[in-house]
Image (cartoon, rainbow, N blue to C red):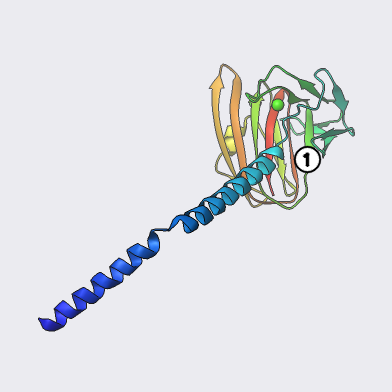
Amino acid sequence: MDTIIVQNSHIENHIKNQISECVPNKKQERKIAMRSLIVLLTVVALLSLSSGCCLKFSDLTPGTTYNVGDTITTSRTNIVVERFQWSGGAWTSNGRAGVDNRQYAQGTGNDLTTDNTNLNFQFDYPIDSVSFRFGDLGGNINIRVNGNHKNEQNFINLNGSLIGGVQMTVDAFQQGNNWYGKVVLDGTINDFAVGGQELWLDDICPDP
Ligand SMILES: [Ca+2]
Ligand SMILES: [Ca+2]
């Protein structure tokens, strides 16, 4: 019994020491407050940097159109307009891309639109993921990741599939013949292009 009592008092002393170490004096409180402030400022800075790299197209002008072979520059990122593959398998180079503010992609401000074109995003590859909002108002869509090209009626058909070794997740809903939603591509990406016959795109967010 004696031994147990000695051990208990030893434990009590140990706990008391722990508690006293955890209660800071005024000087320590100031130090902790300063550290917390620095951590908070760092987090805010990182968040503003990461959200700043999404393409929102606010620097483009509604009504502008682009042909296959043109380069769109937005938020210091180049986007090359490429040819599009119809559902039957034939390719067309006669489509266009454009800017409008009808917000069918359910983002904010301007959207980029594709009218039988693909958009090849020239990010600072490799990136770990990319996400985008879309409004698909008709026809088929194309998507290419790491050279793996897919041609489908709707993005939802590719939900849960691997494209170019990258996991594709689609969160979308249908209204009449239109589809609205968000696509997330998760995995190492060195090449990314997407387009449609009547596709609106916004908030394209690469994760470096
Ligand atoms: Ca926008
Ligand atoms: Ca469609």
Residue 103: horizontal and vertical position, in percent? 67, 20
Cβ(mark 1) to ligand 1 < 8 Å?
Answer: no
Whether residue 82 is visible to the viewer of this picture, yes or no, is no
| Mark 1 residue crowding within 10 angstroms, few (<14) / some (14–19) / many (20+) | many
Residue at the image position 73 percent from the left and 53 percent from the top:
126
Q: Quadrant of the N terminus?
A: bottom left
Residue found at the far left of this picture: 1
Observer-nearest residue: 55 or 68? 55
Residue 73: horizontal and vertical position, in percent? 84, 34
Residue 36: horizontal and vertical position, in percent? 53, 50
Residue found at the far bottom of this picture: 3
Query: Image quadrant of residue 45?
Result: top right
Task: Give SS at disc 1.
Answer: strand
Q: Would you place residue 62 above or below residue 84 in this image?
A: above
Residue at the image position 85 percent from the left and 21 percent from the top:
64
Q: Would you place residue 174 above or below residue 33 in this image?
A: above
Observer-nearest residue: 71 or 47? 47
Whether residue 35 is visible to the viewer of this picture, yes or no, is yes
Residue at the image position 67 percent from the left and 24 percent from the top:
108
| 199 sits to left or right of 5 | right
The residue labelled by disc 1 is: 121
Question: How many numbered marks appear?
Answer: 1
Residue at the image position 70 percent from the left and 16 percent from the top:
102
Q: Amino acid at mark 1?
A: Phe
Residue 199: horizontal and vertical position, in percent? 70, 25
| 207 sits to left or right of 77 | left
